[in-house]
């Protein structure tokens, strides 16, 4: 699966030439893979993705920028959250841990992200209200596939 994700990522290397990241999980019920390309803007040193919750049960990959992440982070710290990075990605993750999917409406920015929660065995895919950060998805051949550019999906048969 990582080979397919890497090939899909290579098709969009221009969206994030600084680094890539991968998460894969397989069990008796399903296989899941998430990948991302990163353009390092915020938290150049420790913002590598994917980012995991402290107990490793929740994982996020994120594309975009959360404009109000500093305010949200301050609120989370007041509630007892601790952070390992200075990235807006970790703020989304911690906010989700505390408030679930209701937290998504607090995000001000341009974004698309995927959160896999092993506790609930659910995958959440979200993007900003205005769709500034693209998010394409399809269900095909018993798979659900999503990407930030259509060519990663359209060319999936050529990367298999």
Image: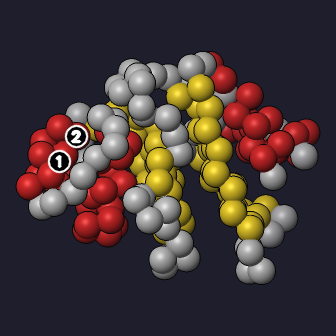
**Image location (x, y in percent) of residue 124:** 48, 63
- Measured as percent of width and height from the top left, residue 26 is found at 74, 68
Q: How is the image coloured?
A: secondary structure
Q: Residue 132 occupies which quadrant of the picture? A: top left
Question: Which numbered tag is attached to residue 72?
Answer: 1
- Gap in Å between the C-alphas at discs 2 and 1? 5 Å
Q: Please indicate whether residue 21 sits to the left or right of residue 40 in the image.
A: right
Crowding around mark 1 (Cα neighbors within 10 Å: few <14, some 14 to 19, many 20+) is some
Q: Secondary structure at mark 1?
A: helix
Residue at 91%, 39% (x, y): give it.
158
The crowding category of the residue bearing disc 2, from other C-alpha atoms within 10 Å (few below 14, some 14 to 19, many at least 20), is: many
Residue 128 seen anywhere in this rendered image of the structure? no
Q: How many labels were placed on the picture? A: 2
What residue do we see at 56% from left, 20% from top? 18
Marks 2 and 1: CB-CB under 8 Å? yes
Considering depth in this image, is 144 or 3 the residue closer to the camera? 3
Determine which quarter of the picture holds residue 145.
bottom right
Q: Is residue 71 left or right of residue 2?
A: left
Q: Is residue 144 left or right of residue 38?
A: right
Q: Is residue 149 left or right of residue 58?
A: right
Residue that appears at 21% across and 57% down: 81
Q: Which residue is mark 2?
A: 69
- Secondary structure under the numbered disc 2 in the rendered image: helix
**Residue in front for this viewpoint, 35 or 136:** 35
- Quick check: 149 above or below 60? above
Identify the residue shown where x is 27% and y is 58%. Answer: 95
Q: Position of residue 96 (x, y in %)?
A: 32, 62
Rendered view: 68 above or below 136: above
């Amino acid at each position: 699966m990582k080979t397919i994700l890497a090939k899909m990522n290579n098709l969009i290397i221009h969206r994030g030439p600084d680094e890539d990241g991968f998460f894969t999980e397989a069990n008796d019920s399903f296989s899941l893979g998430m990948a991302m390309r990163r353009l390092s803007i915020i938290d150049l040193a420790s913002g590598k993705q994917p980012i995991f919750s402290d107990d490793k049960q929740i994982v996020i990959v994120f594309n975009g920028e959360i404009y109000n992440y500093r305010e949200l982070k301050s609120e989370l710290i007041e509630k007892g959250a601790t952070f390992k990075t200075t990235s807006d990605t970790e703020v989304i993750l911690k906010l989700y841990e505390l408030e679930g999917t209701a937290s998504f409406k607090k995000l001000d920015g341009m974004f698309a992200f995927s959160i896999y929660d092993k506790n609930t065995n659910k995958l959440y895919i979200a993007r900003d209200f205005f769709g500034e950060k693209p998010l394409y998805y399809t269900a095909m051949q018993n798979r659900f596939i999503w990407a930030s550019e259509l060519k990663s999906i359209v060319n999936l048969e050529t990367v298999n």
